[in-house]
Image (tube, rainbow, N blue to C red):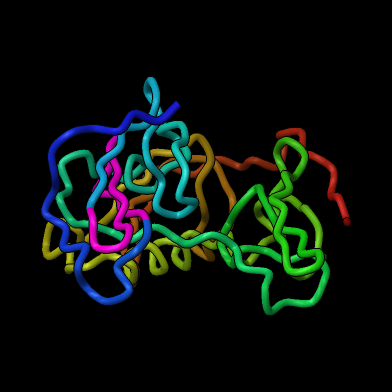
Amino acid sequence: MIELLAGSAVLDCTRRNSDGLYGRGCSSKFMRCHKGKLYVYRCHKNLKFNVETAKCEERRQVIACINDMDDDQTIVKAVGPFDCSKRKDGIYGSGRCSTTYYRCSGGNSAEMLCPAGLYYTDKLKGCDEVDSIDECNVLTSLQGFNERRESHLGERGKYIERNLLSTFNADGRYVGGTRRLSLGEEKSSKNHNSNDKKRPTRQTL
């Protein structure tokens, strides 16, 4: 359930090509521009708006929340819906590290979900372990996120702390521990070998 809120936010919906959804930091509120008008919404319960998926999701799934950007006021346009109108029938990924993928059929798109613990990869046109997927390289993900921001983070955003149960090594691959990252360099705090963990089985579609 999504609640429509009264009031407005600092977002000009009269600009060209402004239609779409927008988020700001780690917040349950999000905005929609539609035909020059601004609408403000709030996600249900404790969910946060994720500009990477244009959905309300748990805090641990939202990159702005993982990076403790609760007070960030920078407005970011959310990724639009997957468009199959000019694509051949088949399976497609979103280009991001995601547990979902899309099936195009007759110009229509259907969102599909990988089995628990697996992520979609274009290399296999299927689902695989996260440490085998280029799209899940953390530096690539952070760069894509920052490119969609409408202003620079400045010194406050020079380093991004990712407090994850499972993070990435010097090559951007999956390991245990916590790592402090920027787009150009990284500092490691503690590393643990995650090879002992039981891995989900690769799935090819």
Q: Could you tell whether 185 is left or right of 120 in the image?
A: left
Quarter placement of the C terminus:
bottom right
Q: Residue at x 72, y 77 (%)?
A: 87
Is 28 included in the stretch rendered in magenta? yes
Whether 98 is among the magenta residues is no
In the image, residue 118 sits, relative to residue 15, either above or below, namely above
Which residues are drawn in magenta?
A: 21-37
Q: Is residue 195 left or right of residue 65?
A: right
Number of residue marks: 0
The picture places residue 189, in percent across and down from the top left corner, at: 36, 45
Is the N terminus in the top left, top right, bottom left or bottom right quadrant? Answer: top left
Query: Residue at coordinates 59% horizontally, 51% vertically from top-left?
Result: 174
Frontmost residue, 82 versus 141: 82
Above or below, 59 relative to 96: above
Q: Position of residue 126 (x, y in %)?
A: 81, 58
Give the farthest residue toward the right. Answer: 204
Residue at point 40%, 33% (across, down): 59
Residue 105 percent coordinates (x, y): 81, 64
Residue at the image position 45 percent from the left and 54 percent from the top: 52
Residue 102, above or below 87? above
Q: Pick the residue in front: 30 or 147.
A: 30
The image quadrant that residue 162 belongs to is top left
> Most extreme residue toward the top, as rendered?
45
